[in-house]
Image (spheres, rainbow, N blue to C red):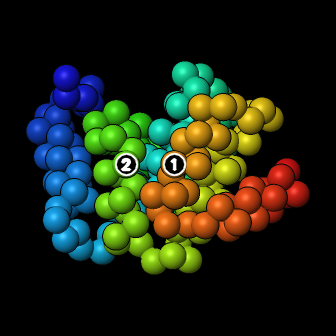
Amino acid sequence: MAWRFALPGRTDYIERMFGDFLKSLLAPEPAPLTEADGRLALAALMVRLARSDGDYAAAEIARIDRVLTARYGLSEPDARALRGEAEALEAEAPDTVRFTRAIKDTVPYEDRLAVIEALWQVALADGARDHEEDSLLRLVTSLLGVTDVDSAMARQRIETRG
């Protein structure tokens, strides 16, 4: 079932925007992501990770907003709006394997390391390491072509910062 925004008159535009974004990610030879699409893709991955354990906790939502605010210099309302778009995209996005492979093909390695660090911030936001989140993070790390060592170092940086 297709996700729909509750805003009258915007449904077709928004569905077309997400459809176009997903098509571009899944094209045989995807073009590099624009900055806006990269933001949305990272936000959607963070939402997917936070939802993976079946408990989309307030601490995880707040952490996603803080990561988006800090990483992209967004205002709090703009970060919340981006997260809202990401929640919708995540619900419509294909399986994690195809989604992350498409990102891998369009995002440089250094930026993928930053993605893993952002994901660790979300995974550790509620103070507990969950099996489902750990499993998804291992999968995403591998699919993004990031080494286990680099992922572990990213986790350690986040744990140290608190």
Figure disc tally? 2
Mark 1 neighbour density, 10 Å: few (under 14) some (14–19) many (20 or more): some
**Mark 1 highlights which residue?**
139
In x, y percent, where is residue 3? Answer: 25, 29
Sequence order check, earlier mark of 1 and 2: 2
Q: Residue at x 41, y 72 (%)?
A: 107
Residue 110 is marked as none
The correct choice, above or below, for 118 with respect to 58 in the image is: below
Mark 2 residue type:
Val
> In the rendered view of the protein, which quadrant contains the N terminus?
top left
Res. 114 visible in picture: no
Q: Position of residue 156 (x, y in %)?
A: 81, 58
**Is residue 88 or residue 144 the one in the foreground?**
144
| Distance from the alpha carbon under mark 1 to that under mark 2 | 8 Å
> Disc 1 residue type?
Leu
Task: Name the quadrant containing residue 143.
Answer: bottom left
Residue at which label 2 appears: 97
Q: Is residue 14 left or right of residue 96?
A: left
Q: Residue at x 17, y 62 (%)?
A: 27
Q: Residue at x 56, y 77 (%)?
A: 110
Does dot 2 land on a helix, a strand or a loop? helix
Question: Circle 2: is it few (<14), some (14-19), or many (20+) Cα within 10 Å?
Answer: few
Quarter occupied by residue 41 = bottom left
* 151 relative to 30 in the view: left or right: right
Q: Are marks 1 and 2 in contact (CB under 8 Å)?
A: yes
**Residue 114: x percent and y percent?**
60, 67
Up/down of 159 relative to 128, above or below: below
Q: Is residue 134 above or below residue 33?
A: above
